[in-house]
DNA sequence: GTTCATCGTCGAACCGGTTCGAAGCATATG
DNA sequence: CATATGCTTCGAACCGGTTCGACGATGAAC
């Protein structure tokens, strides 16, 4: 393989001069620079990443730690991953994707061996076991998902409480007085998915504030349990006129279920969901919903991470915790109750 | 950061001895080995990946080139990715995930800079532009998806022609004599997704051989076009008694569509799909289908790639093209026609 | 009591970049 | 004419591992 020595020889200069000509870190005569550029092209020279990493202690690679937990909706994850990889590439970074079950161990491995310049954590839990490892790591990290303790970390997430309030207010304003909220399965919550609680608590509080009834239940995430469960919920609350769905599997199954029950939307029942735009498009869900914009979160996290990596040693900017505001996309699935 | 020199000093030996003690490539007294192991633990030593890559010209990283093409079903991709990452990790490799639009360029970048020891290509097209770049690369590569020319590459794919024949034969055996096949959108094919053609051609041929009628059409992949299109297809072939669905978006939309038309499965219409098991579970599709087992393909590709990486220089084993046999999972959506 | 293997360890070189200090040279300055 | 200045370029050291050749010590063989 051709190395910088070959380039230097072909251009008739020393290795250091070739290096400076390419990096532009010192003044080089245009004549020499042209000769070096020519040699690079002629020989097809591409710097060796390992050698460069060793010399500069920069790998231009970011770690992306995704954990695929059972009973969480996997396809949604892909949107985050794409947001992260695309943005990273725009900024000159590649992505090391880690899906190991033992996230803390994997994190230590890639940070301590200096394979990456920084790390993005996906699907962060309330008390995420990866956080202690990340805080000890020599590289900075950014989180997608809000944990209990954000100290020393940049955190990005959807404003779930606000999403809960918006869903309630939207239906309240239309005149609804009894609603049902179907959340993710309860074991998603106990495992640390606090976003479920945050939306739910805020929705309950807002309902109380508005003086309306909100039945909050946990849904299933797999068929055939989903169908049975949703039917049971609807049977249990026959007078409810609005449905809030914070559960992709339930949302996906809902059109068929309502059809079977002879209910039409929004005449018989108003429905508001909470899932990504991409999800709605792919599965043709006709429900108004609060977008979660996973690609935007990925983009923000990488931007901030790269900014922090670029900070001169010693200088530490304040860490940010940033929530994106929920937006309700109207697909015509809500109306005043009958 | 602690390096091997620190370990050597703590153990009272030379750097080379410490290295040999850790790698086991030369005989070392148990006493020294224990002292070195102790020092490693006490100092928390983890070798620098860049330095090791430079010295050994092995990075223990595999490149994974995924391309997210418009109008192809993205969530399916995730299953491949997981099969690849999990298997790679089992074999000691990490994964560099590349999703750049210009795949050939990205491939050259990561191979020529020696960031990876090998490459897995996902979603390979009939005349994939990445293949010339891969053939010139110094590292081996494995493909998931069958291109026109497999020379010098290990290739893995589902046996799509056999899948097409199985779908036809299954319904033919039940007594059906007029079928409709809905494939992926036509522009997926023209862009190089030859698997669509391979299944379709084999199905048509098999239908002819059995002496039955098969109407082969291309479906849409996005709502609301999917719904309109499927309804039009059903209207156009009112006497067809069986439906073959090689299109995730159509499969996902089908339950609602059939419900609206007042058709029940399998009494009025028999349906056979072709999608992954995971897809069927997540979206509660009640259709018998041919599994594509994306995780198994990912696993096979990585296994073979790692085997080839381990081959001593100069020795070249014959390249393999391996198809996994389709399996029809019966979910009770087929029956003799009325 | 030499000679010869064998075993365990060390020093030095190497992988391929980057970067620091210094040196050569032409030109401007006193 | 001697010195200062700025612009280019070079040599050498360094990043942190691995690996080759050599060397001293120990025990066996003759």
Image (cartoon, coloured by chain):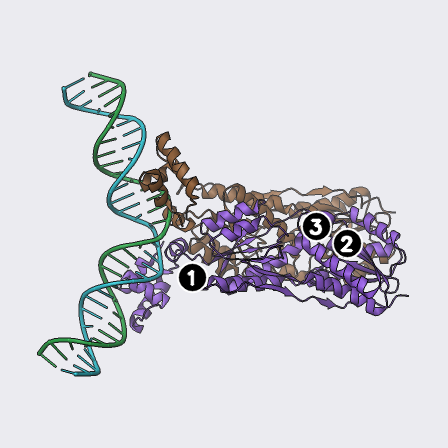
Chain colours: A purple, B brown, C cyan, D green
Q: Chain of mark 2?
A: A
Q: Position of residue A116 (x, y in %)?
A: 47, 54
Cβ atoms under marks 2 and 3 closer than 8 Å:
no
Q: Chain of mark 3?
A: A
Q: Are marks 2 and 1 on the same chain?
A: yes
Tell whether A161 sits left or right of B302.
Answer: right
**Residue A100 sits above or below residue A178 on the image:** above
Q: Which is nearer the N-term, disc 2 or disc 1?
A: 2
Q: Which residue is denoted by mark 2 in the rendering?
A: A250
Alpha-carbon distance for marks 2 and 3? 16 Å
Disc 2 packing (10 Å; few <14; some 14–19; many ≥20): many
Tell whether B31 sits left or right of B228.
Answer: left
Q: Are marks 3 and 1 on the same chain?
A: yes
Q: Secondary structure at mark 2?
A: helix
Q: Which residue is denoted by mark 1 in the rendering?
A: A313
Disc 3 packing (10 Å; few <14; some 14–19; many ≥20): some
Q: Chain of mark 1?
A: A
The answer to which of B118 and A250 lies nearer the viewer is: A250
Q: Secondary structure at mark 3?
A: helix
Q: Which residue is denoted by mark 3 in the rendering?
A: A189
Is any part of residue B123 visible from this angle?
Answer: yes
Q: Are marks 2 and 3 on the same chain?
A: yes
Q: Position of residue A329 (x, y in %)?
A: 74, 67
In this rendering, the label closer to the viewer, 2 or 3: 3
Tell whether B131 sits left or right of B7.
Answer: right
Alpha-carbon distance for marks 3 and 1? 39 Å
Picture quadrant where residue C3 is located: top left
**Residue B141 sits above or below residue A198 on the image:** above
Q: Position of residue A68 (x, y in %)?
A: 63, 49
Cβ atoms under marks 3 and 1 closer than 8 Å:
no
């Amino acid at each position: 393989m051709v190395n910088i020595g070959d380039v230097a020889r072909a251009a008739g200069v020393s290795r250091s001069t070739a290096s400076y000509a390419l990096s532009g870190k010192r003044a080089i005569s245009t004549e020499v620079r042209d000769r070096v550029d020519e040699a690079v092209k002629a020989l097809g020279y591409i710097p060796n990443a390992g050698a460069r990493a060793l010399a500069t202690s920069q790998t231009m690679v970011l770690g992306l730690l995704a954990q695929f937990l059972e009973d969480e909706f996997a396809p949604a994850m892909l949107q985050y991953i794409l947001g992260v990889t695309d943005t990273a590439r725009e900024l000159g970074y590649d992505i090391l994707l880690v899906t190991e079950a033992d996230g803390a161990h994997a994190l230590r491995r890639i940070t301590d061996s200096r394979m990456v310049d920084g790390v993005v954590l996906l699907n962060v839990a309330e008390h995420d076991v990866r956080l202690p490892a990340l805080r000890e790591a020599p590289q900075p990290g950014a989180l997608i998902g809000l944990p209990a303790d954000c100290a020393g970390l940049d955190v990005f997430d959807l404003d779930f409480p606000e999403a809960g309030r918006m869903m309630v207010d939207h239906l309240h304003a239309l005149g609804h007085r009894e609603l049902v909220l179907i959340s993710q399965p309860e074991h998603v919550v106990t495992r640390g998915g606090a976003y479920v609680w945050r939306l739910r608590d805020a929705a309950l509080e807002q309902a109380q504030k508005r003086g309306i009834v909100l039945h909050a239940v946990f849904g299933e995430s797999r068929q055939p349990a989903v169908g049975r469960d949703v039917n049971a919920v609807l049977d249990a609350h026959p007078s409810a006129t609005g449905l809030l769905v914070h559960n992709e599997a339930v949302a996906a199954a809902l059109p068929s279920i309502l059809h079977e029950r002879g209910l039409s939307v929004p005449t018989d029942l108003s429905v508001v969901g909470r899932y990504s735009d991409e999800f709605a498009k792919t599965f043709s869900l006709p429900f108004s919903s609060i977008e979660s914009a996973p690609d935007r979160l990925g983009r923000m996290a990488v931007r901030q991470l790269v900014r922090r990596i670029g900070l001169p040693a010693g200088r530490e900017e304040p860490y940010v915790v940033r929530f994106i505001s929920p937006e309700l996309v109207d697909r015509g699935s809500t109306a005043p109750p009958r």
